[in-house]
Image (cartoon, coloured by chain):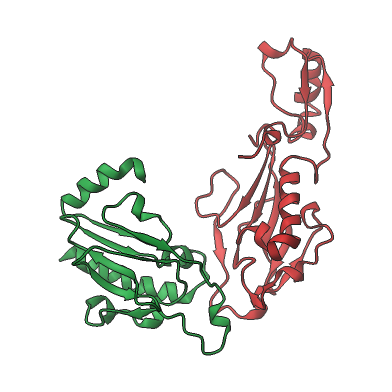
């Protein structure tokens, strides 16, 4: 992606939307992103009553008419230190952003998350990720059609 | 590479079949239950020699990592391992009529199964050895002076069909005068990046 930085910047400046998910190292090719990876506990759910700690940070956001906390909870891969003025939608157990929308850094919109729904949905493995995409993609489509 | 007798270990879901004879990945039908993850050795294969297939069904007591579906078995392919009671061919080897072999594992990284220091490491070594033609082959090394007599012998009837897949690159007229070494899968012997 890094050879395409200028193209992405031009697209954003023209009002475009870029969605960057998972461990895609978005800080390398999109502006204003500060990411801290964290070790992933793939087995947390084997402990009865365990709580990964993911929380919805903006329950009034239209996305969460389609998604519940359960639908954004599978793994943690890291958190962001986003610029002032972004909309933080979800945080980890320490309250650090893991899903946010940045409409301040560029004239466009960046939907940034360390959640990796596409990987797991495509692997036919993780029902929560399918539920996430069932909610997220129609929401994104609706936003873009407005 | 395959036409020249090379080998391709394909680890993943076949969503864009890249040559004639290959078909699409089919996931297990939902809802998936524990018995659907049962693995069964259907035919012996050097990659899996001495490995109990059932031992690969679970990781930390959780089933489903090995794979959750299968890539279509090509006509003439050999099913090695089956998944679920229906024995869908999750692992298979296909010796292409046009030359070369493809092994398909329709799941997670095979080398990551059974613990990276244990069976997984062994599987990784076996996969590399298989790609290099060191196992699972009737590896034939024919050293000859490259005369057209030899080309006739390897590439014309009646032996062309037999030599397909192991005889090595089709030699051109220009190189026919040079001494040529033929081996089972020259392309696959290059270092793997």
Q: Is residue B124 above or below residue B139?
A: below
Q: Nearer the viewer, residue A53 or B156?
A: A53
Based on the displayed image, in which of its 4 quarters is residue B177 positioned?
top right
Residue A74 at what x, y percent from top left?
Answer: 46, 75
Q: Is residue B77 visible?
A: no
Q: Nearer the viewer, residue B82 or B49?
A: B49
Residue B108 at what x, y percent from top left?
Answer: 60, 61
What residue is at 35 percent from the left and 72 percent from the top?
A: A96
Left or right: A139 with respect to A55?
left
Question: Chain A, which colour?
Answer: green
Q: Is residue B23 above or below residue A118?
A: above
Q: Is residue B88 visible?
A: yes
Left or right: A79 with respect to A31?
right
Q: Is residue A24 above or below residue B177?
A: below
Q: Nearer the viewer, residue A132 or A39?
A: A39
What residue is at 33 percent from the left and 49 percent from the top?
A: A29
Based on the displayed image, in which of its 4 quarters is residue B25 positioned?
bottom right
Left or right: B102 with respect to A115?
right
Q: Nearer the viewer, residue B78 or A82?
A: A82
Q: Which chain is red?
A: B
Residue A109 at what x, y percent from top left?
Answer: 21, 60
Based on the displayed image, in which of its 4 quarters is residue B64 positioned?
bottom right
What residue is at 58 percent from the left and 82 percent from the top?
A: A46
Tell me the quarter of the image containing the N terminus of chain B.
Answer: top right
Residue A18 at what x, y percent from top left?
Answer: 27, 57
Q: Is residue A127 above or below residue B152?
A: below
């Amino acid at each position: 992606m890094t050879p395409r930085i200028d193209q992405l910047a031009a697209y954003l400046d023209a009002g475009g939307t870029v969605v960057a998910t998972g461990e895609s190292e978005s800080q390398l090719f999109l502006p204003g992103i500060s990411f801290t990876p964290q070790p992933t506990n793939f087995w947390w759910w084997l402990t009865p009553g365990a709580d990964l700690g993911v929380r919805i940070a903006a329950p009034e956001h239209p996305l969460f008419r389609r998604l519940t906390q359960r639908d954004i909870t599978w793994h943690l891969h890291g958190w962001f230190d986003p610029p002032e003025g972004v909309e933080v939608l979800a945080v980890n157990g320490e309250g650090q952003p893991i899903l946010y929308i940045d409409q301040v850094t560029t004239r466009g919109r960046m939907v940034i998350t360390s959640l990796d729904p596409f990987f797991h949905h495509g692997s036919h493995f993780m029902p929560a990720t399918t539920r996430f995409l069932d909610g997220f993609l129609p929401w994104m489509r609706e936003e873009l059609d407005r | 590479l395959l036409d020249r007798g090379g080998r391709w270990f394909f680890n993943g879901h076949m969503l864009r079949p890249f040559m004639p004879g290959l078909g699409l990945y089919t996931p297990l039908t939902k809802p998936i239950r524990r018995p659907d993850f049962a693995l069964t050795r259907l035919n012996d294969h050097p990659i899996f020699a001495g490995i109990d297939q059932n031992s690969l069904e679970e990781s930390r007591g959780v089933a489903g990592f090995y794979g959750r579906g299968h890539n279509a078995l090509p006509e003439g392919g050999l099913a090695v391992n089956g998944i679920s009671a229906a024995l869908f061919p999750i692992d298979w080897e296909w010796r292409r009529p046009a030359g070369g072999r493809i092994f398909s594992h329709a799941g997670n990284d095979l080398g990551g199964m059974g613990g990276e220091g244990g069976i997984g490491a062994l599987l990784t070594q076996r996969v590399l050895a298989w790609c290099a033609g060191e196992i699972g082959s009737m590896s034939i090394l024919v050293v000859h002076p490259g005369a057209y007599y030899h080309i006739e012998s390897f590439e014309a009837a009646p032996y062309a069909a037999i030599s397909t897949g192991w005889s090595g690159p089709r030699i051109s007229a220009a190189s026919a005068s040079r001494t040529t070494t033929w081996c089972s899968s020259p392309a696959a012997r290059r270092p793997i990046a």
